[in-house]
Amino acid sequence: MTKEAVIEVIKKNIAANSDDIDAAGIDPQKSMKDYGANSLDMIEVVSTSMRELKIKVPRSELTDLNNIDQLADKFLEYVNKGNG
Amino acid sequence: MADKALSFSLADFFFNDSPDVLTPPSDFQSWFEHPKIRSAMGLFGQQLLAAPRAGTEVLSSLDGKRHKVINMTSYNYLGLSTHPEVIQAAKEALDLYGLGASGAPLLSGTFDLHVEFARRLAQFKEKEDCLLFSSGLGGNVGAIQGLLRKGDIFVLDEKCHKSLIDGGTLSGAKMLFFSHNDPASLEQMLEKCKGKRVLVAFEGVYSMDGDLARLPEIMKVCAHYKAATYIDEAHSTLMFGRNGRGVAEHFGLEHEIGMSFGTLSKSFGGVGGFVCSNARIIAYLKGYSSPWNFSCAPSPPVVAGMMKALEVATRDSTLRDALWKNVAYLKKGLLDLKLDLGRSESQVIPIIIGSSGEKLIQFAYEIQRRGLFLQPVDFPAVPADARRFRISVSSQFTQEQMDTALTIIEDVIAKGLRA
């Protein structure tokens, strides 16, 4: 799986979790907070994305990430490890 | 999973993919049964075998035996749960009214005691009326769920208690979180809410960090946007302000606050919650606040005890003075040990140890072995890089208890962090 594909999964879930955001308009260099997501929205987006990618990343490893791009890198690391 | 069990936490098992709702997630069970997780979990839910005084006894999960401990975890900030006058008042009410209210407040659960206590709480908080809840969590959930509707906006400090978040979720209102204690972030949120009904919630003392709301700045922003305000004074009522009315009194802003919430399980030493506000909205809430009108009214002897607790705590400043003296003494001792106490400005004093969950649990067991009951607070309750212990200071602590605790904290935590 490519990083672009991972980013697409995250973008789709951000859009699905918000009434007024279009996936195409999401810039991976920004954080979910920039798109108005609160902490509950972020848990939802991260959980649905991980479910779709069939990975399980500990939440404690996600707390220092600054943007969607970094989240995709972390997800990709686990996708490549085949870690469910 | 097995080799990195300690990297995972309860935050990782919230969503359950198991096809059977009554079966936990498949990997939860193996995580939960991992020896290191079992050992860590053993710290939580240990049984107290005596009243939550500064000196108490626990059934320790270290060895399954009774241990005498110095208790720095209970919320008995002013020692009122065991105050002789409070106990006497509760005993007398028990004889007169029995154990339970046996009814919801609108039908048969309202006793003269409930009406009188609510009246005194409203008078104490200098508001028109008060609504009394059977639990603190229920008070926040019930007030928010009763006030807000779909289409409204609930703006909260990101460190607000779960009960406020749950109330918001139940109400159907859109929730926006502003950065902790940051008036500029609050302003950004309120800018997005123009034309909507908005309620802004914050706490007097934040429970995990012990810092105070930056109330003057926050209230200024709320006033500019004409947003209604809600303060949670769970950890500040009876302790802050010249008359013990809370952090809003401390800053001289209590009359500007729209609705004021307090719990009865902390400084009051009982159990329950209450909100004070204008009489019209309290009357309205009685119709729509489910934890009030669909729950049995608070137990009469407990209400009588708490009414006495209010009297004892406010007739003079003896208990408050003793508390702040102990806070100053312990803080100085902890700072002398070069420990990180975050931004604590209250009787809630965190000792932040950093990112190692393993160290946190190891220290927790060791301090308990030495006779100090001081519970750890782990991720996700606090950030993963700021795991901590949290001292709840009590006016009951003696000099000797504090000195013993400081020695244990020095030996185990301060030296352990340097090792």
Image: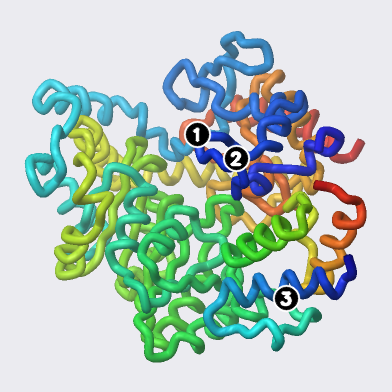
**Quick one: which residue is furthest to the top in this view?**
B65
Q: Nearer the viewer, residue B50 or B31?
A: B31
Output the chain of dot 2. B
Q: Evaluate whether label 2 is on the same chain as label 3.
A: no
Circle 1 — which element?
A: loop
Q: Nearer the viewer, mark 2 or mark 3?
A: 3
Say which residue appears at 82% left-offset and 68% top-offset. A72
Output the chain of dot 1. B
Vertical placement of residue A47 versus B329, above or below: below
Quadrant, the N terminus of chain B: top right
Look at label 3 and name its amino acid.
Ser
Q: Nearer the viewer, mark 1 or mark 3?
A: 3
Whether residue B7 is visible: yes
Residue occupied by mark 3: A31
Residue occupied by mark 1: B74
Q: Within 10 angstroms of label 2, few (less than 14), some, or many (20 or more) residues?
A: many
